[in-house]
Amino acid sequence: MCALRLNRDVGGFSELPYAVALLNTAIWVCYTASTPGRVAAFVTNSLAFILEVPISLFAFNSIHVRKISEDFEFVRVLLS
């Protein structure tokens, strides 16, 4: 995580772990919200979801920006 923050890029990492973590916490929040007596799990997973959203958005944005720039580089090489 420190390397991601320092470089402001996810490098060669996949976006799959970020998507899975976000989905996992969202499912747990839904489950604990609908099950009585799971307040601690609800609070924990709600906080995890809140923390995971900006991390995932950063990762998705960084990955897609890199892919778009790679595509433009490919087109530039083809046209030259």
Image (cartoon, rainbow, N blue to C red):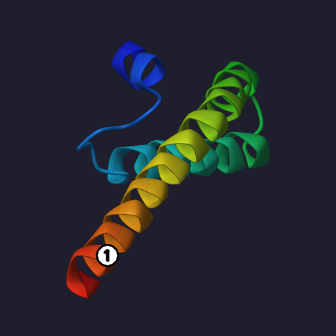
Q: As drawn, is 30 to the left or to the right of 68? A: right
Task: Work out whether 31 lies above or below 36.
Answer: below
Query: Residue at the spot x=40%, y=61% of the render?
Result: 69
Task: Work out whether 54 lies above or below 74.
Answer: above
Residue 49 found in image quarter = top right
SS type, badge 1: helix
Residue 66 found in image quarter = bottom left
Q: Quadrant of the N terminus?
A: top left
According to the picture, the residue beneath numbered tag 1 turns out to be: 76
Kindly identify the amino acid type of the residue bearing the numbered disc 1.
Arg
Judging depth in this view, the residue of 58 and 74 nearest the camera is 74
Q: As drawn, is 1 to the left or to the right of 56? A: left
Query: Residue at the spot x=65%, y=40% of the render?
Result: 53
The tally of labels here is 1
Q: As drawn, is 43 to the left or to the right of 41? A: right
Task: Work out whether 13 lies above or below 4.
Answer: below
Percent of width and height locating residue 22: 54, 46
Q: Spot the residue most to the front.
A: 80
Query: Residue at the spot x=54%, y=43% of the render?
Result: 56
Percent of width and height locating residue 3: 35, 18
